[in-house]
Every structure is written in structure tokens, then in C-alpha cells.
Image (cartoon, rainbow, N blue to C red):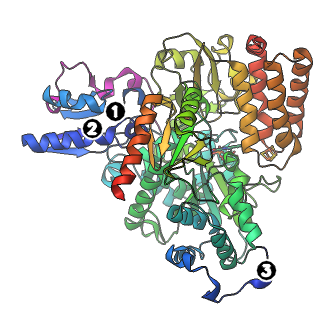
Amino acid sequence: MMNNAAQTNSYSDIDPDLWQRGVVDTVANLKKKRGALLPILHAVQDEIGYIPPAAIDYIGKALNQTAAEIYGVVSFYHQFHTSPGGAHQVEICRAEACQAMGSRALEAHAKDSLGIDYHQSTSDREIRLEPVYCLGNCACAPSVRIDDKIYARVTPERFDRLVESVRTKSVEVK
Amino acid sequence: MVKVYVPQDTTSKALGADEIAFAIESYAAQQGIGIELVRNGSRGMFWLETLVEVETDAGRVAFGPVMPEDVDGLLAAGLLHGNEQHALFLGLTESIPYLAKQQRFSFARAGMDDPLSLDYYTANGGFEGLTKALAMNGQAIVDEVKNSGLRGRGGAAFPTGIKWQTVHDAPADEGETKYIVCNADEGDSGTFADRLAMEADPYQLIEGMVIAGLAVGAECGFIYLRSEYPEAHRILNDAIARAERAGYLGDNILQSGRRFVLEVRLAAKAYICGEETALLESLEGKRGMVRVKPPLPAIKGLWGQPTIVNNVLTFVAVPFILREGASAYADVGYGRSRGTLPFQLAGNIQRGGLVELGFGTTLRELMNDFGGGTFSGRPMRAVQVGGPLGAYLPEAQWDTPLDYESFAAIQGVLGHGGVVVFDDTVDMSEQARFSMEFCVAESCGKCTPCRIGSTRGVEVIDRIRANESRQANIALLEDLCETMVDGSLCAMGGMTPFPVMSALRHFGEDFERGE
Ligand SMILES: Cc1cc2nc3c(=O)[nH]c(=O)nc-3n(C[C@H](O)[C@H](O)[C@H](O)COP(=O)(O)O)c2cc1C
Ligand code: SF4
Ligand code: FES
């Protein structure tokens, strides 16, 4: 993974999957920005749902950095995942204002009802569960984020309904 | 044509504002009533969200809190005619005491109109500060900010004018520019003032940053925005594009020949990246490791160039200061804390929301007069002010005036103005444990006391809670906290002991519940 000597500008050794996945385009569009790495990682994860090893290699080459350096950045931030997970990301706020309104019970309920812990995905590959420390909705806690939507005053019952509605939505799309 | 306002900020949407807006539009279409639906920002009275406002002859009247399931009934009962008889009718919005009693400098426009409306912004004082600044030299702008007494709102309360002076005086390298960086990582739990400022009045932030650029001779700005704020992201990007098209940003600001470009960069879920040097590392595309100071970011900041890093609330105070004059700002306040602070009432509180006030009110007044007691109706027991690194305050300390020095005197921090209320069901040993656990999760790892100490802290608190050699372990926890305070490079490790030790000191009985 860290082999600098293997760096090449030829496209022939790019994982063909990455072409389809738009990583190459993303990198080409963003790499001229100063400090391009985070914008690139966000864009790749938005598209694919995680940062695959092949993308780490490719980004490293494009930015003239080693794959180890890129991996070091990816692993530093809670945002980025290096393995595929559920189609929808469910984040539960663990921070103090939500604690004051029962988020500990909500967390326990969520793990129990989904049958997974944080950083895991349900076996139907629908839901990835992640912690989050504040969504800025602290006046109407507890707070949950599902993909890009935030929900206020989430009770355990409401949590189950929200998760259910996300699951059925994905079925419709398929 | 009836004008109806339904907010579009994160909290309103989280409470169903989109569904409400949709229901109102459908009803009006069905009934053939002509309405103009404005998706305004929130006024920050989150306990009343979704706050639906209707323009009447008497002025804007409010209904709230409206739940999606209330809308049909409300519409049938004459919402669009401002029916005063309805149970959710609140009267004139401006007269709601929660709002009327505030001193809104930075949040005067919040919730008044579509946050992206440039017409509204410019008709209500927007860009007047910028216009004045364009006619001044950099030093005169810096002086104005100095005279206002403004101190950084991100936590450390450092005098803003002095920071700007340093950047003003430091030259950029050949072929490089200085930078203006807005810290919009708002990592403190219980805070949402940055979010509201960005979602409800984004041009004010843009204006503040452009003025900073003019003051110190910087041509490039970044807003480092937490990725937990998707609505703010959308609104800011849109606002920047519109401001550019209208000539408030870009190569030739208002035909002055001055240049300032601005870009939003998304953070990536790391609390430590709110610390200014870790933030700069992150912007440069690296791990968010804290830098050793000196050099100060003001001298060697982003890509080694002189850089202003200020909090969102610091920048948004600046247009007012330029427009109304430094003394209009400095006239309000308490002791060395000048101007206003947007406090944020959160957690277990009846009336949570944003309360912008001059410094000096007591915490108790804020929590009771505005907050109205707990949400649960149970007695209040502990309050954490100033984010996850702030102390837990027992009732005996609630009469402390809300200003930087008074809080420092009780080993508290006002920080970013977050007030998180807990009722009497809280277990303070669990809160102390969480503070250590948060430090484990969020430490950048550079200093041993922070990285290892916090892990040890969790273990020791667990032992105390399990009633294992309690006295010895309490002594150990105290030592550990001291080591963290003394041996940490930044406030992450250096202040985590504040909530821990305050919990132990003031709520010791909770550490004695052990099985
Ligand atoms: C661990 C840690 C987290 C911080 N988080 C934030 C933050 O989220 N937002 C912020 O504005 N300042 C934060 N700060 C303070 C910044 O380091 C810096 O003081 C501030 O951005 C300067 O702006 P100001 O002078 O306008 O307050 C944090 C500091 C530390 C030590
Ligand atoms: S105190 Fe903690 S977060 Fe701060 S620099 Fe040291 S290790 Fe990093
Ligand atoms: S603490 Fe949970 S949303 Fe802020």
C-alpha cells in the first residue's frame, strides 16, 4: 500500500470500478484546490458510502502523497468509513443536552431494536448506526440524524417509526 | 394575498416544519386562497417551533408550537385570518416576552424573512457596515473593532481587535495572501447560536468576514463548517453564490477594486478540529493535530500565512459595530465583557432557545425568566455552562452574573454561551464518566496526560462507582485531573477535569451510590 515506486500517471492500473464510481472525476475536479484532501474524501464517501482501499491508493497518487498518509487522515476523522455499511446512516446524539433528555435510554433502545452496536450495520444492509456529538438541536432534544435529515424530541417509539419509514422507502426505490 | 411564514432552520424542520408548509400550501390551493409562503429562518424560540406567523393588519402574529398533526385543525379554524381565539395563538410575534426582553444585535434579522433574500438584508442595515469599511483604511477598521471591546465568542474570549492588529501588522509571504478563517465547527454540546446565525442570517457572516479581510488585507476566506449541519451547509453555499453575483464577494467588491473570495469547507466529525490550530491542519488536508504555539496563527496560520481565526459569533458582531459605531456595542455589557452574548438554553428546559442579552444577567434569571424551569417539571439540579469542557454548577452558584470574569472566578467558563440544564434524575458520576469518555474519543493524541489520562479517568470513575477502594480512587482521580490540567497542550485535556472535578466536588453523593 505504501509503495511509492509504484506511482504512475498511467490510467491503465486504475481499478475499473473506480471509473464507474466517479472517483476519478471527483479527484480531477477537486485536486487543484488547496487542501483538497478533505473535500475529496467527503465527495468520494458521498458517492460510494465509504472510502475503498483502491480509492485511498488512487487519491494518494493524485495528490502526491503516500497511501499511508491518506489512510492516516481517513482514520483520524470519525466521519470517514473504510468499509461498506448500511444504505442509510442513523446517528444518535450522545452529547450532554440530549443526555439531559433521555438519550442514554434512546441509545440503548436503538442498539437493542436494531440488534447492532455503534459503527455496525444491520444484516439487511439498510442501517448503519453511528454516534454523533451534537447536531445543534439541543433545545429540542434528544436528536437523531438519518442521512441528511434531523429529528427532534425522538422517543424510542418514534425512533422505531423513523427507521421503519427509511427501510420502506429504500424498498420502493428498488 | 396572505403572507405566511414557516421557518426552515434545522430545529423547525426537525419538528416537522416542511410537512406544515406543505399542508398550508395544499390547503390554500384547494380553497383558492392566495398565499405567499415565506420559508424564513427561525427566531430562535425553539420551544415554540414550529412557529407559524401570519401577516395581519395589526402586524405579524404567531401560532405555536404547531405540530404537523395540528395543521388541518388550525387551517380550518382560520389560521390564515390570524384567528385570535385559537389555543396556539400567541399574539404579535414581536411582543412575545421571550423575544421582547432580548437585546438583539447579532440576531436582529434572524427569522424575519427568507435568509437568502438579499433585498431583505440590504433593506435592513445589511452591507452598511461593509460600505463604511470600504471607505476606511485597514487600521481604522481594526481600531473600531478594538474600541467595541469585542472578545472572541468561540471560548477563550481573546480581544478580537488585538488579534486583528497582529494579522494587520504581519506581512504575507511573496505571492501569498493572508487568510480569514471562520470557525464554524461549533462542537460544544448545548450550543446552536452559530448554526442559527448561519441558517437565519448568512449574509451577516459573509459581511463580517469581508470586513475582516479589508481590515487586515486578506483576500481569501474559509468557513470551516461542522458536517453535522447539512442545512447550514446548503444555505451558506447558496448565500455565497448570490453574494458573489451581487458583487459583495469576488475580484472587485462593490467596484472598489478590493478582492475577497470565500469558500465553505466541511469538517469531518472531530471535536478537536474546533481548536484553531487543529482546524488549520484540517483545512490543509491533514489529521487534526494541535500545533504548538507560538507561532500564533495570526502570524503563521493557514499555509504559513497570517490568519485570523474567529468564531461565527465574533464575525457576525462586526457588521453591527461598523454600522452603528464601536460605542453602540461597547455601551452594553458588564465589566470587561462588552456587548451581547447569544446564550443558548438547552437540555432539560421548558423554553429552550437562543437568548441574546448584554452580559451581566445572572444564570438563575436566564434559566427561570427565559427558560421557565425544566422540561420534565422536576427540580433543576445541575447546569453545565460553556460546553463539554465547562464545569457543572450546583444551585449555590446560579446567582453568578453571566460574564467572563465572574465565571472564571468560580472556575467556570462562559465559553460559547451554552447552558445545559439537568433535572434531579441526573447521576453526576455518570456525567463525570462521560466527560472522560468524550476526551478519550476526541483527544488528538499528542499529549500523554490527555490521551492516556482520560482512559485511566474512565477506569477510575468506574471503580469509584463500583465502590472499590473509594477514598484511594477519589485521590487518584484528583491527581489524574491535576496531571491533565498541568500537562496538556490544549484545553481538551486541560479542561476535561473541570466538569469531572466540579461533579465530584458539588455532587459528591452521586459518587457514593455504588452497588
Ligand atoms: C478542544 C477545543 C475545541 C474548540 N472548539 C471550538 C469551536 O467549536 N468553535 C470555536 O469557535 N472555537 C473553538 N475553540 C476555540 C478556538 O481554538 C479559538 O480560540 C477560536 O476559534 C478563536 O475565535 P474567537 O477569538 O472568535 O473566539 C476550541 C478550542 C479547543 C481547545
Ligand atoms: S490536550 Fe489532548 S487534544 Fe489537546 S493537544 Fe494534547 S492530546 Fe491533543
Ligand atoms: S447535544 Fe444533542 S443536539 Fe446538541
Q: Badge 3: few (under 14), some or many (20 or more) residues near its Cα, within 10 Å?
A: few
Dot 1 or dot 2, earlier in sequence:
2
Dot 1 lies on which element?
Answer: loop
Q: Badge 1: few (under 14), some or many (20 or more) residues near its Cα, within 10 Å?
A: many
Front residue of B207/B56: it is B56
Same subunit, labels 1 and 2: the answer reads: yes
**Where residue A76 appears, x then y in whole percent?**
71, 55
Quadrant assignment for the N terminus of chain B: top left
Per the model, the C-alpha gap separating discs 3 and 1 is 56 Å
Dot 3 lies on which element?
Answer: helix
- The magenta segment: B78-105
Question: Is residue B372 placed above or below B264 in the rendered structure?
Answer: above
Which disc number belongs to residue B20?
Answer: 2
Left/right placement of residue B2 relative to residue B91 reads left
The image quarter in which residue B442 lies: top right
Same subunit, labels 3 and 2: the answer reads: no
Front residue of A11/B157: it is A11
Chain where mark 2 sits: B
Residue carrying label 3:
A4
Whether the residues at callouts 1 and 2 have beta carbons within 8 Å, the answer is yes
Residue at the left extreme, as displayed:
B32
**Where residue B433 appears, x then y in whole percent?**
74, 28
Q: Amino acid at mark 1?
A: Thr
Chain where mark 1 sits: B
From this viewpoint, is residue B1 visible?
no
Which disc number belongs to residue B50?
Answer: 1
Q: Amino acid at mark 2?
A: Ile
